[in-house]
């Protein structure tokens, strides 16, 4: 049987090459067309975003020109702790809102430990907390028509760092007020959640412990709460841990001596978020801790302190003395299951 062999001419090869080239060109044209369409879509989206942004800015600028703003400056205590400023400013905010102002907290325009006495820096407060209605100090000063500066003092009705822990109505009032008018910035909360995931995994069974030392112990400032002895706190925490079997104990203090005493007793469970530097506080000088050269103007140190405070506010139970930082914890928290607050009187 004769097998018939196919014959291919040079013309057939040219035809196949031509068809292949035509296909490649069509594919390339398709991708070019797709890219043009995508670029047009992105351009349209960008234009819409820009137009929306411009519209929002126009509306915001108009709003800024029509409202009364109160810029709050706590000049009486530039060396005071962050949450001392926080609770005093909450009181002033409440006052000026009732008077028809939109209050703006200012830690920029006067020398203090948070701007490192440099008034050219951005407002330190706005690194961690939003101002009412998301305005900024810079916007208000630039575009506001009705802007007045007011000195904020501790004489206004404010969160009571001595007694608020026993008054649920007061805690709820200031918690809701702060959440509405000066909430924690979203990026800070994202960072807190990531830190807590790294420290505790998915566990919620966490005891928070805060201890205040350094200048409280050395200077014994008049009117401030007396902190407990570390050995007593260790016994109390051991008792609570035995009863509730915590997965972790989150410990927060600015005092290295207290840390050395406390931490070794809970090696397996202890978790800390240490600052970027040890302050090496000089107990013989009895100076305000915030005037320490390693803290004054050190935004990273201040941020670490605020992150510690927020994490403590999210623990299941809390053990702490009374102080401004503890008032901040109770304002920020959504509630604790069990609390132990040391009430040992005041200096």
Image (spheres, helix red, strand yellow):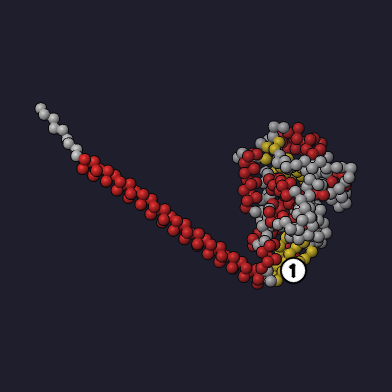
Residue visible at 78% across and 60% down in the picture: 110
In this orientation, which residue lies closer to the viewer: 151 or 206? 151
Q: Looking at the figure, which quarter contains the N terminus? A: top left
94 versus 224 height, above or below? below
Residue furthest to the right: 284
189 versus 135 height, above or below? above
Q: Which residue is mark 1?
A: 148
Q: Is residue 23 left or right of residue 198?
A: left
Q: For mark 1, give the secondary structure.
A: strand
In this orientation, which residue lies closer to the viewer: 250 or 340? 250
Where residue 314 appears, x then y in whole percent? 67, 46
Say how many tags the image has.
1
Crowding near pointer 1: few (<14 within 10 Å), some, many (20+)?
some
Residue 47 visible in the snapshot: yes
Where residue 243 appears, x then y in whole percent? 71, 36
Residue visible at 68% across and 45% down in the picture: 311
In this orientation, which residue lies closer to the viewer: 206 or 191? 191
In this orientation, which residue lies closer to the viewer: 232 or 35? 35
Instruction: Name which quarter of the figure residue 205 lies in.
Output: top right
Residue furthest to the top: 1
Residue visible at 89% across and 45% down in the picture: 285
Q: Is residue 29 left or right of residue 111?
A: left
Residue 343 visible in the snapshot: no
Q: Is residue 203 left or right of residue 10?
A: right
Instruction: Name which quarter of the figure residue 340 lies in.
Output: top right
Residue visible at 76% across and 32% down in the picture: 264
Where residue 262 appears, x then y in whole percent? 77, 36
Where residue 118 appears, x then y in whole percent? 77, 56
Residue furthest to the left: 1
């Amino acid at each position: 049987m004769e097998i018939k062999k196919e014959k291919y001419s040079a013309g057939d090869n040219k035809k196949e090459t031509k068809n292949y080239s035509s296909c490649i060109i069509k594919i390339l044209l398709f991708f070019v067309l797709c890219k043009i369409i995508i670029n047009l879509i992105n351009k349209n989206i960008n234009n819409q975003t820009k137009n929306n942004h411009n519209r929002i800015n126009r509306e915001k600028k108009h709003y800024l020109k029509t409202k009364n703003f109160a810029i709050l400056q706590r000049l009486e205590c530039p060396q005071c702790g962050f949450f001392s400023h926080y609770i005093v400013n909450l009181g002033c905010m409440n006052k000026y809102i009732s008077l028809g102002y939109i209050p703006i907290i200012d830690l920029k325009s006067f020398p203090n430990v948070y701007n490192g006495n440099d008034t050219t820096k951005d407002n330190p407060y706005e690194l961690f907390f939003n101002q009412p209605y998301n305005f900024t100090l810079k916007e208000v000063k630039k575009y506001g028509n009705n802007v007045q500066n007011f000195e904020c003092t501790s004489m206004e009705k404010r969160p009571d760092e001595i007694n608020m822990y026993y008054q649920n109505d007061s805690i709820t009032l200031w918690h809701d007020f702060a959440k509405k008018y000066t909430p924690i910035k979203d990026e800070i909360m994202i960072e807190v959640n990531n830190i807590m995931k790294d420290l505790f995994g998915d566990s919620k069974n966490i005891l928070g412990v805060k201890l205040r030392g350094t200048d409280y112990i050395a200077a014994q400032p008049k009117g401030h709460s007396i902190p407990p002895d570390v050995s007593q706190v260790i016994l109390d925490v051991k008792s609570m841990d035995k009863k509730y079997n915590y997965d972790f104990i989150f410990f927060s203090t600015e005092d290295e001596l207290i840390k050395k005493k406390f931490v070794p007793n809970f090696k397996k469970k202890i978790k800390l978020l240490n600052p970027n530097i040890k302050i090496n506080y000089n107990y013989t000088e009895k100076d305000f801790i915030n005037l320490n050269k390693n803290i004054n103007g050190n935004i990273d140190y201040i941020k670490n302190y605020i992150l510690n405070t927020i994490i403590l506010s999210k623990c299941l139970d809390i053990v702490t003395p009374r102080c401004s930082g503890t008032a901040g914890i109770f304002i920020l928290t959504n509630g604790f299951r069990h609390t132990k607050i040391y009430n040992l009187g005041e200096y």
